Image (cartoon, rainbow, N blue to C red):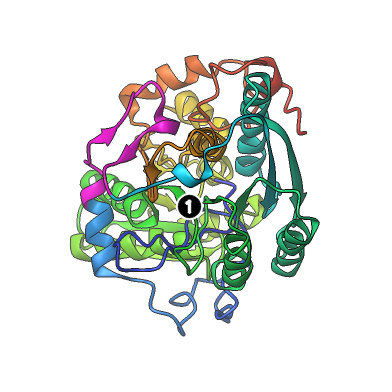
């Protein structure tokens, strides 16, 4: 996945809401390791921070098989049963202005979501729920996003705030200031270290991703087999959680997994794979995001080696290559349809309806027997599109997504 920036999830009710999602900004308390770089194996991620959390691991493991409330045909409205927020005080007639402080649209995953969000916005404008959505793009910069939120607060014209934080700790106080306005605040995708928001929306999380992917690869291999783990960058919670879960499982199964940071650079990925193939057979490739999955497979093809067992993501470039090569693979998902949910949550809030305090969305990987179905459903979509974008029922489908019309 394009993922840059992913934050942690706080799933226990007694814990603060901490983030989720993938992108490129890192936790400001973390420094990059000297092991990160071209062709170099990753050190143990930033050694200053222990990313494994057994409680969170267990919670997300259980949530992988949880029953979700709501219509499965509308996964962007489904949620795991839990505490609900009373929004009756926000009930108000008429159309409302929404102010959206977005971390960025700097990668294909966020671009796909942004397209879907804008088509959902048009639908809610058409039904008189939202009058306009003023959006400010922080371009992956914490200080810019803090200034954006403070601008909205000072402007005083927002009926509601939607915030996709650039990073967790840095944005916490700005989100709290938005909460202090008395207006509803919806945080999604990545979280912050406060529970003041009206709702926090996110898929299950990084540990679930790591469990799905490492279990899949381990079940296909034998103890002692070598796996190359390709990681985008250090210090991003959900990405770190993905690897922490995968590393645990690989170690338990006796799989020899060697991880590298790649910054999603296809040239770097090819070099890493080529160097590893020169030292022996590579039986599997694990990725913490799908960017560069095609490059990894091309390195095997260039070397004339048997293609590996592999996990990528639901980006169309990987799904297409998977089909073409017939590899043994699966595509984990960090549900892109979550970009619809904040606006649909506001529709409920303005009606005074209760909504989940922590809105945990489905996060189901694509398995081999579903590949053809998802390729068919997304026929004609460009390589940077994400299969589980969840916007098929919106106006403009499929042309808006096919043409990548970025608002």
Q: Quadrant of the C terminus?
A: top right
The image quarter in which residue 94 lies: top right
Which residue is nearer to you in this view: 69 or 111? 69
- Relative side of 84 to 76, left or right: left
Q: Which residue is mark 1?
A: 198
| Depicted 21 relative to depicted 126: above or below | below
The image quarter in which residue 386 lies: top right
- Relative side of 256 to 31, left or right: left
Q: Quadrant of the N terminus?
A: top right
In percent of the image, x 61 and y 37: which residue is there?
A: 113
In percent of the image, x 51 and y 53: which residue is there?
A: 21
Residue 194 coordinates in the image, percent (x, y): 47, 68
In percent of the image, x 40 and y 60: which residue is there?
A: 9
Q: Is 399 colored magenta in this rendering?
A: no
Q: Is 70 colored magenta in this rendering?
A: yes
Residue 384 appears in the picture as rendered: no
The image quarter in which residue 80 lies: top left
In percent of the image, x 56 and y 15: which residue is there?
A: 379
Residue 387 coordinates in the image, percent (x, y): 51, 28
Residue 83 coordinates in the image, percent (x, y): 30, 50
Query: For the residue labelled by badge 1, is the local secondary structure a helix, a strand or a loop?
Result: loop
Q: Which residues are magenta?
A: 62-82
| Depicted 45 relative to depicted 47: above or below | above
Badge count: 1
Which residue is nearer to you in this view: 235 or 326? 235
Which residue is nearer to you in this view: 187 or 258? 187
- Relative side of 249 to 179, left or right: left
Which residue is nearer to you in this view: 56 or 300? 56
| Depicted 169 relative to depicted 123: above or below | below
* Circle 1 residues within 10 Å: few <14, some 14–19, many ≥20: many
């Amino acid at each position: 996945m394009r993922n840059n920036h992913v934050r942690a999830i706080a799933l226990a009710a007694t814990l603060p809401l901490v983030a989720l999602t993938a992108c490129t900004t890192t936790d400001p308390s973390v420094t990059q390791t000297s092991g990160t770089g071209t062709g170099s194996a990753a050190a143990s991620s930033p050694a200053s921070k222990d990313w494994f959390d057994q409680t969170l691991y267990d919670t997300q493991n259980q949530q992988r098989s949880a029953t979700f409330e709501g219509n499965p045909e509308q996964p962007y409205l489904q949620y795991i049963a839990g505490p609900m927020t009373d929004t009756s005080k926000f009930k108000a007639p008429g159309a409302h202005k929404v102010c959206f402080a977005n971390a960025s649209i700097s990668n294909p995953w966020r671009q796909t979501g942004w397209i879907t969000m804008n088509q959902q916005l048009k639908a809610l404008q058409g039904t008189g729920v939202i009058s306009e959505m003023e959006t400010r793009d922080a371009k992956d910069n914490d200080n810019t996003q803090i200034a954006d939120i403070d601008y909205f607060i000072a402007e005083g014209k927002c009926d509601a705030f939607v915030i996709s934080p650039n990073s967790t700790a840095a944005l916490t106080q700005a989100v709290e200031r938005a909460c202090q306005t008395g207006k509803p605040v919806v945080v999604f995708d990545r979280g912050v270290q406060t529970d003041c928001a009206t709702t926090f929306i996110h898929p299950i999380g990084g540990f679930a991703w790591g469990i799905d992917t490492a279990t899949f690869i381990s079940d296909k291999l034998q103890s002692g087999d070598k796996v190359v783990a390709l990681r985008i960058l250090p210090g991003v919670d959900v990405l770190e959680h993905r690897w922490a879960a995968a590393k645990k499982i690989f170690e338990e199964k006796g799989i020899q997994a060697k991880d590298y940071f790649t910054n999603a650079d296809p040239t770097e990925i090819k070099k890493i794979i080529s160097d590893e193939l020169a030292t022996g057979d590579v039986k599997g490739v694990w990725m913490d995001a799908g960017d560069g999955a095609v490059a990894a497979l091309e390195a095997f093809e260039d070397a004339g080696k048997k293609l590996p067992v592999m996990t990528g993501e639901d980006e169309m470039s990987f799904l297409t290559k998977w089909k073409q090569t017939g590899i043994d693979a699966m595509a984990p998902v960090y549900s892109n349809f979550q970009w619809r949910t904040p606006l649909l949550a506001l529709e409920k809030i303005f009606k005074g309806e209760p909504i989940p305090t922590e809105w945990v969305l489905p996060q189901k990987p694509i398995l081999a027997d579903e590949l053809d179905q998802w390729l068919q459903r997304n026929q004609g979509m460009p390589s940077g599109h994400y299969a589980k974008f969840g916007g098929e029922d919106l106006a403009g489908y499929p042309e808006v997504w096919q043409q990548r019309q970025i608002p």
